[in-house]
Image (cartoon, grey):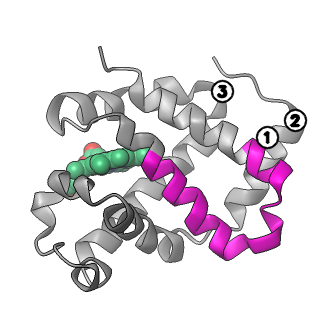
Amino acid sequence: MVKWTEEERETIRSVWEKVDIDEVGSQIIARTLIVYPWTERYFGRFGDIFTTTAILNNAKVAAHGKVVLNALDLAVKNMDDIKGTYSALSRLHYDKLKVDPDNFKLMADCITISIACKLKAALSPPVHMIWHKFLYAVVEALNSQYK
Ligand code: HNI
């Protein structure tokens, strides 16, 4: 289990409370698909995601980012058991969606970069370091059901 100091808990909460799930959520999947185009193969259900313009205008892409950030909200609220909180989600990505787990880190980076674009100087290097520790715990938890 990941251990958190009070300072880390406070920093993660303070980053998270500045994140507008609708605004940032609508960007994170688009960024992932554009920067790492091979991730397109998992989102066949989303229709036209074959060009940058199509990705940026695809309502399903925008909506799915909010689903992902709502799952992150659960992790923020259950920091002492992210692994347990994400157990079913990990299994879903492994068993049903068959997502290569290397992609979790890439999407996590896209989340951080989208947040950085909003928070600017508030995501200072020390704050970034703690936020990264949190997202790393999320990535580890998503990996947990992979054998
Ligand atoms: Ni992911 C569905 C959370 C990374 C591909 N994903 C979900 C759902 C949540 C979720 C929540 C909805 C589950 C349900 O319906 O019960 N995904 C997360 C989180 C991360 C993540 C928190 C990491 C930060 N997912 C990824 C990655 C990929 C991915 C890296 C592929 C590159 N996810 C999917 C796909 C679905 C999905 C595909 C199904 C989408 C749909 O609606 O068809």
Question: Is 115 inside the magenta-drawn segment?
Answer: yes
Residue 25, position as x, y percentages in the image? 46, 68
Q: Is residue 52 left or right of residue 43?
A: right
Residue 122, position as x, y percentages in the image? 82, 67
To which residue does mark 3 refer?
80
Q: Nearer the viewer, residue 43 or 1?
A: 43
Q: Does residue 143 lie above or below 107 as drawn? A: above
The answer to whether the residue labelled 1 contacts the one labelled 3, judged by CB atoms less than 8 Å apart, is no
Q: Does residue 13 lie above or below 48 as drawn? A: above
For marks 2 and 1, give the CA distance.
Answer: 5 Å
The label number, if any, that marks residue 36 in the structure image = none
Q: Earlier in the sequence, mark 2 or mark 3?
A: 2
- Give the main secondary structure, helix, strand or loop, of the magenta stretch: helix
Residue 36, position as x, y percentages in the image? 34, 57
Q: Is residue 7 left or right of residue 39?
A: right
For marks 2 and 3, give the CA distance.
Answer: 12 Å
Mark 2: few/some/many CA within 10 Å (<14, 14-19, 20+) = few
* Amino acid type of the residue tagged 1 in the rendering: Arg
* Amino acid type of the residue tagged 2 in the rendering: Glu
The answer to whether the residue labelled 2 contacts the one labelled 1, judged by CB atoms less than 8 Å apart, is yes
The span shown in magenta is 106-130
The label number, if any, that marks residue 9 in the structure image = 1
Mark 3: few/some/many CA within 10 Å (<14, 14-19, 20+) = some
To which residue does mark 2 refer?
6
Taking the view exactly as shown, the residue that stands out farthest to the right is 7
Taking the view exactly as shown, the residue that stands out farthest to the top is 147
* Amino acid type of the residue tagged 3 in the rendering: Asp
Q: Quadrant of the N terminus?
A: top right
Residue drawn at x 19%, y 35% as measured from the top left: 98
